[in-house]
Amino acid sequence: MSSGFSTAEPATKFTDGELVTAVGSTCVCHRVRRHGKWHFVKRLRPELAGDPRYVEAMRKEFETGYGLDHPALARYVELGDDYIMMEYVDGTPLDEFAAHRPDVFANAATAWRLVSQLLEAVRYLHHHQVLHLDLKPANILVTRIGHDVRLIDFGFCYTDTWRDTTGLTAAWAAPEQLCGGVVDERTDIYALGRILESLPLPRRYRRAAQRCLESDPARRYQNIDQLLTALAPRRRWPIAAAVAVVALAITGWLVRDHPVSQPQPATDDTVHTTPADTLAAPIEALDTAPVTAPIPPPPSETAPEAASPADAPPTAIEDPEPAPATEPAPAAETSHNTAPPRHIQSLEQDVQDNINELYRQATSFQRTPRIIFLRQTLPQQFDELINYYVQAGNYVKVSEYTYKRQVVMQVFDEMGM
């Protein structure tokens, strides 16, 4: 930092100020103090100062920015012969901020706060007939105090009155920009997809970014409102899902206390009345499996069926009782009522404890280390239980744990995990 200005600096009226110089692609930028207040001044690089396209772009930036008023946009203050002045933002470019503070993006609430501020700023521009056309992390500042978004630099923007966009940043530009095609809101949405893709955000942001990055503008979100709707956290669902989980944890699944609702062959519709409609297909597949495990009947019971009338002993012919081995119901009942091994009982208790803990922590909507552990552990525990009960032929238990697994995974999915 130094006092005074050389002849290469913006204007002599700031000789009583202090400055910090930064050189960009088209401008030399200064932080100056005027009447005790910090401002930001930018001036064209000397080699571009005589180019009428860039001179016009600077005037366009000032006139566009001066007519806008939004908390996430830097305010423009003054236009000089060779400079523009705007409010100084004490902040860090978005990419640098993300590198130093990944924890802010790992937290669902703070990540959404930053993303929504950026989207609202772009939405405001579009509603005022302005396309930014140079959205990139370097033009998005995150303030040191409060971590709020400030969008800067309208030098390449498009408006109804300033239609020459002058330039672009190729790494963040949409295909239609690169080939000189028609630009509209979807061009900015493409750049927003690049930005979302570059940040350490939860999974649901990456899914939205993929749609933003479609090469065909018709396949992208058509406006910022659609993108906001797609990304907005559905806060009621994690709480409702957690309530569902705790209900399962406290009371168990309903069919446990009502064995008559046990899954029947595919003609029985009762299996499709569970709240998890998406489980209809896997449960229907289970219905086609044997109701009981393939346990062979005792030899003494199968002998009368296997033997031919000629070979059967006389006592068997005189026996008036029918062969009881053809009745599978007692075997099925015994299979379902048999207590599982101790390690399965212990695993079931662990799952129940983990579900209870998930309920307690999911309502905070934060990715704590314990939530991350549960995300890794619970699916494996559910899979082990489901595999065991498939082998045991107990499809009531299979349906119970399949349903619980889906509810738990939906909680994790809504938390971006």
Image (cartoon, rainbow, N blue to C red):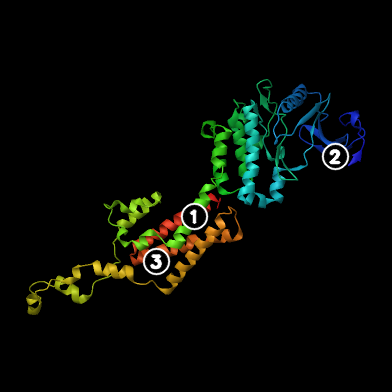
Q: Could you say whether the residue bearing mark 3 is in a helix, strand or loop?
A: helix
Question: Which residue appears at 49% of the width and 52% of the height?
Answer: 241
In primary-sequence order, the first of circles 3 and 2 is 2
User: At which x and y percent is residue 279?
Assistant: 39, 52
Quarter containing the N terminus:
top right
Mark 1 residue type: Val
Q: Nearer the viewer, residue 192 or 368?
A: 368
Q: Is residue 350 above or below residue 119?
A: below
User: At which x and y percent is residue 39?
Assistant: 82, 35
Dot in front, 2 or 1: 1
Q: Is residue 142 above or below residue 78?
A: below
Q: CA distance from mark 2 to mark 1?
A: 55 Å
Answer few, some or many: residues within 10 Å of disc 2's Cα (few below 14, many 20 plus, some between 14 and 19).
few
Q: Find residue 388 and name its label.
A: 3
Dot in front, 1 or 3: 1
Which residue is tagged 2? 20
Mark 3 and 2 residues: CB-CB less than 8 Å, in contact? no
In primary-sequence order, the first of circles 2 and 1 is 2
Describe residue 276's horizontal placement relative to residue 242 as left or right. Answer: left
